[in-house]
Structures are given as C-alpha cells and as structure tokens.
Image (spheres, rainbow, N blue to C red):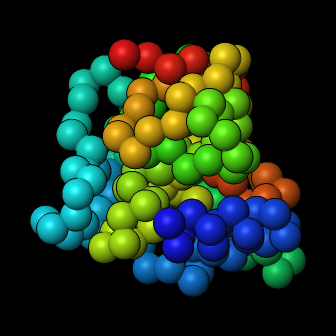
C-alpha cells in the first residue's frame, strides 16, 4: 500500500507522473506483466490475454525534455490507438475512498505488493468509469474510449473514459 499512498499523494499535490517516473526504475518485463515481482507475493502477476491491449505496447514510450518538462514521445502504433475503444487488463489503484470506484488508475503491476516495483506513467492508465467498478486486488479488465495524452497536466500518458468492467 506504500506505493499507492505515494502516487495518490503525488497526484493530490499536483506532481506530474513524469516526475514520479524519474524516481523509480523502469520495470523489467513490464509489457509481459512480469514486472519485478516476488514469487512469494500473494498477488499473482498479470497473465497475458489476446483480447486486451498489451502493456508491452504502452511501455514503449520515450520522453523528451521541453522547457523543463518531460513529455512523452509515442510510437506510431500507440498514436493509432487514440480515441478508439480498447480493453486493458491491470490492477486497480483507487484515487478515491470506497468499495466501488469511478476514477482510478490501472497499473501493470499490483500496487499493494510490497515486493513489486511500480513503474512510471507508461505503466499506468487513468480510468474514468461510466459505472462504478468494484475494487479488488485481483486483475480487472476494463473497456472504454482510449486516449493518448501528449501533454497531460498531471503527467499521465493514457486515459480510458466511459469505461466499463469486462469479465
């Protein structure tokens, strides 16, 4: 829960996620769902699914420095996803209290895992749900309108809006 608190605090105080990315090392194998994950963790890493957008595609982003800010430079494949419906699998990181969440981050690694290293903004997607999604420590799949964010004020790289939980 330590990392969840840190990221929530960073967002609450307006620190861009790009700055958080500079504080944490990249995730080895983030695209496969492997991440840096202990076999002793009670939470299993993501299992690859053919019906969801792979994290490996989202984490292939580079950054450039523009006027003391880090901005993402996306691959053409990622840019082509902008404003299209997508399914994404990940672990919920609530941004508000409560059992049912309308606004949360979806992460490629479980944020409650004390043995997992969180990634930067390339390994998280902001979710704004149409209907509340029940919080769980298990992986969830959401579907909605995917946005590639070139210059988000909070440093986010991706957002899914009008999202719904998928079985």
Quadrant where the C terminus sits is top left
> For the point 15% across and 68% down, which residue is it?
40
Left or right: 128, with 2 as reference point: right
Comparing 56 with 14, the one in front is 14
Residue sitting at x 57%, y 26%: 133
User: For residue 27, which quarter of the picture?
Assistant: bottom left
Counting from the top left corner in percent of width and height, residue 78 is at 52, 39
Relative to 12, say whether 123 is above or below.
Answer: above
Locate residue 60: give its quadrant.
Answer: bottom left
Residue at (40% x, 45% y) in the render: 137
The answer to whether residue 82 of the structure is visible from this angle is: no
Q: Is residue 112 above or below residue 136?
A: below
Viewer-closest of 23 and 61: 23
Q: Residue furthest left?
A: 39
Between 40 and 120, the residue placed more toward the observer is 40
Residue 138 rendering spot, x and y as whole percentages: 35, 40
Q: Residue 144 in the image: state x and y as whole percent.
A: 59, 20
Above or below, 14 relative to 85: below
Taking the view exactly as shown, the residue that stands out farthest to the front is 99
- Image coordinates for residue 11, horizontal then vertical, percent: 76, 63
Residue 24 seen by the camera: yes
Does residue 70 appear left or right of residue 27 in this picture?
right
- Number of numbered discs: 0
Residue at position x 72%, y 46% in the image? 96
Comparing 8 with 29, the one in front is 8
């Amino acid at each position: 829960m330590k990392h969840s608190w840190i990221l929530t605090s960073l967002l609450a105080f307006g620190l861009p996620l790009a700055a958080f990315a500079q504080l944490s090392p990249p995730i080895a194998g983030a695209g496969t769902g492997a991440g840096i994950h202990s076999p002793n963790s009670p939470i299993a890493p993501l299992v690859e699914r053919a019906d969801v957008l792979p994290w490996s595609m989202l984490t292939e982003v580079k950054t450039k420095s523009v006027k003391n800010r880090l901005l993402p430079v996306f691959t053409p494949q990622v840019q082509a996803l902008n404003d299209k419906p997508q399914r994404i699998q990940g672990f919920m990181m609530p941004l508000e209290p409560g059992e049912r969440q309308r606004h949360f981050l979806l992460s490629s690694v479980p944020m409650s895992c004390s043995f997992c290293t969180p990634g930067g903004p390339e390994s998280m997607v902001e979710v704004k749900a149409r209907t509340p999604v029940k919080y769980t420590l298990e992986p969830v799949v959401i579907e909605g309108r995917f946005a590639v964010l070139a210059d988000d004020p909070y440093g986010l790289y991706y957002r899914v809006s009008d999202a719904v939980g998928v079985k």
